[in-house]
Image (spheres, rainbow, N blue to C red):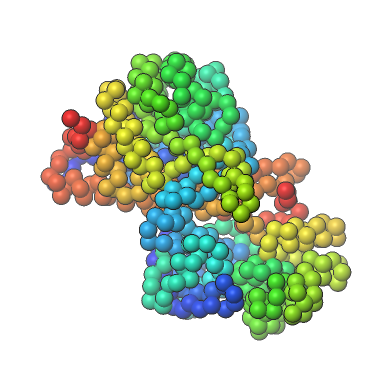
Amino acid sequence: MKPNLQVHIGSMLMANPVTTASGTFGFGPEYAPYVNIDQLGAITVKGTTLEPREGNPTPRLVETPAGILNSIGLQNPGADYLIEHYAPYFRELKTNVIVNIAGNTVEEYAQLAAKLDPVQGIAALEVNISCPNVKKGGMAFGSDPAAAAEVTQAVKNATSKPVIVKLSPNVSDIAAIAREVAGAGADALSVINTLLGMAIDIRQKKPLLGNIVGGLSGPAVKPVAIRAVWQVYQAVSIPIIGMGGIMAAEDALEFILAGATAVAVGTASFTNPRATLEVLEGIERYLMANGIADINQLVGAAQP
Amino acid sequence: MSKVLDAKVLAVYQVAPETYYMELEAPDIARLAVPGQFVHVRCSETQEPLLRRPLSIHMVSRPKGVLALLFRVIGKGTEMLAQRQPGDLVNLMGPLGRGFTLPLPGSRVAVAAGGIGAAPLVFLVQELANMKCQITVYLGAKDKKSVLCDGQFEQMDAEVVIATDDGSLGWQGNVTDFMGRHMDWRRTAMTYVCGPKPMMQGVAALLAEADVPGEVSLEEHMGCGVGACLSCAVKISHHGKVTNKRACADGPVFPSWQVVWD
């Protein structure tokens, strides 16, 4: 018998627990030659701001052991462009589209959420309070419990769509931030964004990234992410989308056992453009091989 | 549409210092590819290195379903790729990117190659020769040993002008200087350039001065290769407005007059 893969993230029903990590999957069409996007539980698209942004100087990407450092800096075409050019495509998809939103101020987050609220084809908003690559906003909100709560509440008040808040690992107590954000009304949490990192070119004696620092992702960060999901699961009762270094189904299962209801595949898509679907297939095989009828039984199953 | 597939290595050998030629069985990619496009190559089976390597398509044989790469070993990824043996499988994504714009049949064209930049220009000259174009290739290299593809260009009836930094073959100096002194731009319908950034910038400046069209193939650190991650941003000026374009998806080939060189 086919196991049940359906999960709920707030009021959003996902046919299966696999989505994409924002910034690694464009707006969807980029990966359409390799993946039937409708087979995924959701896609989470590129971080979007009210106004278009040109992002950071190059180089924006550096390879590190079992990972990559990026400093894209939220380059995106802006909310109007998204509504005009991508929303019609989102509406044609059978899967859920989660739009990642970012801003410089609490008001900007709220304005953007209000602007996207009536847009059909967007199933949920993911609030990016954890981008390490922008000077204002981003991580500044995600590392202060009160500011994180304020942004969450402002976005909640501006939209009827489920609100997922994406947390930064670059904090001393992620559980404390999670509690504040959940208390402010978040419907779910994405755990984790990238880890702030840096690399230096020893020949040029200069930082390798144009922005000097960037966000580390890929297999190198997975143990940090698993720990964060574990701690957040113990702190709050809202669902968690786990992410950080998922390359294969085995990694995704670790996240689910730690407490994630859904998982996002990010950097792995660069290595293998079919990684999202292969993770999904592997999860299904695992459930069948272990006689587990419902994925939800596995969520947090490793917790005491 | 681009594919992802395992391609069998048919041949691999070293052709110049740190430079390898590799033939792969990839009929689905060979059929669709146009000059200037690239394949995104998984060089490792493990997570080290994690990212693919974008390599320009050097040649294709559509009847045989064969794709050829010519690449320089510059790091761990390309080093691992060079060690593959005939019969091994290499995972490829492609064809990717926007290639060169072809001229009218029979046009007189110039092709400027610097170092490993010659790789995609062989495929281009293949197509230009099929279109009965009159082709002059300006081929620059460090020294005689590093001159790439001169025989291939000559076989396709292109006139080949060689410039080496040390003068060990052809003209002593760089391709840009040679072209600056000797080109008759009024008789050149189109110029195609691929090479190190200073060389492309130099030729682009000559083209701008002569007010004639050309195309350059840009390089930038790439992640996804499909336009999703926005790592490989290049500054492009269009109608006076400068924006970031993606080398992987909007390029790698861009009109020479639109590129904003830092």
Horizontal side, residue A49 vs residue A163: left or right? right
Residue displayed at 41% across by 76% down: B85
Residue displayed at 80% across by 57% down: B205
Residue displayed at 65% across by 48% down: B234
How many numbered discs?
0
Q: Give above or below for A281 relative to B89.
A: above
Horizontal side, residue A104 vs residue A273: left or right? right
The answer to whether residue A157 of the structure is visible from this angle is: yes
**For residue B256, which quarter of the picture?**
bottom right
Q: Give above or below for B70 relative to A102.
A: below
Instruction: Locate residue A287, reporting x and y percent.
Output: 18, 45
Instruction: Locate residue A201, reporting x and y percent.
Output: 58, 50
The answer to whether residue B34 of the structure is visible from this angle is: no
Instruction: Locate residue B168, reporting x and y percent.
Output: 74, 79
Instruction: Locate residue A91, reporting x and y percent.
Output: 43, 36
**For residue A73, which quarter of the picture?**
top right
Horizontal side, residue A235 vs residue A207: left or right? left
Viewer-proximal residue among B245 and A219: A219
**Quarter of the image where the C terminus of chain A is located:** top left
